[in-house]
Image (cartoon, grey):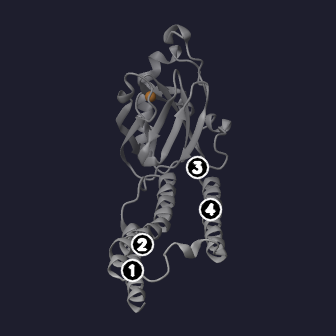
Amino acid sequence: MRNRRTAIRTVVIVWFILAVGGDVALAFGPIPPGQASDLASSESMTILLLAEIGWPIFSAVLAALFFTMVVNRMVPPTEEPSAAALRGNTRAQTAWIAGTLVVVLSLAVYGTVALAIDQPGAGVPTQASALAMPTSTSQPLEVQVIAQQWWFTYRYPTYGGIETPQLVLPVNQKIEFNVTSLDVVHSFWFYALGVKADAVPLNDNVVTATPTKIGTYRIQCAELCGLWHGNMADNTAMVVSPSDFAAWIQQETTLDAPIMKYLLPYSHTYEPSPTIYGS
Ligand SMILES: [Cu+2]
């Protein structure tokens, strides 16, 4: 009996060291998707929280496994069979149900609150934002993402509705991505910003995020969309300073000037053309 107690104590100590060590390591480790936007930071925070809660539980499973496979085999068996104690054990059952309830309910509350803070009014485009230049960085700048087989193009309604093949965003400016498609279902995935939104024909999928780090980023399509789906990846999306952004917009406006009369008027969705797509 004493041996068994010592064994259990050893396992608990092993579990404690594993759990605390892992949680400390997690707190200092890189957590995806990183800190390149407010949305990404919040997602990293959620992943860290879940990992911090999950790791001690996983450690307990490892410790129990270690106990069963190694320690238990070295200790002479006691008279009681190990599994019988749980059957009809009201206290264990109540504790199990209460524990599960607490975990599920607190995560539900946390998830709801996080969602409400990150994406207030998610899915509802702010019509007004397209009409004027944002006067503050918290007022969203509307950027439309148009997915099509097999690339993304971007329109900036605030700047005359110009369309560009490259995504450039000003740093520390709240961006309202309006994601749509011209043909099949695609998915706009800007991993570093924590943005992933389905691009559905005749739908306007809205996500907001504020990029906080100047840099060059990768964008890709995250929905198998046909033969050249793999082509829908771009390593040249950029987050730049407001002055660089203004200069870039100026340059694109000049480039687009001759073709503006052929572009469809800016709209949140576009009718797919049956003659082009053969449906
Ligand atoms: Cu695609």
| Mark 1 lies within 8 Å of ligand 1 (Cβ measured) | no
Q: Circle 3 — which element? A: loop
Measure how far apart labels 1 and 3 are at the Cα level.
57 Å
Residue under label 3, please give it. 136
Which quadrant would the C terminus be assigned to in this image?
A: top right
Say if 121 sits above or below 35 in the image: above
Q: CA distance from mark 4 to mark 1?
A: 27 Å
Quarter-wise, where is residue 109 in the image?
bottom right
Return the x and y of residue 123 as percentages of the image width and height: 64, 40
| Gap between marks 3 and 2 measured at Cα | 55 Å
Earlier along the polypeptide chain: callout 3 or callout 2? 2
What residue type is disc 1 on?
Val
**Circle 4 residue:** 104
Instruction: Between label 4 and label 3, give the one nearer the viewer.
Output: 4
Give the Cα distance between marks 1 and 2: 8 Å
Q: Which residue is mark 1?
A: 11
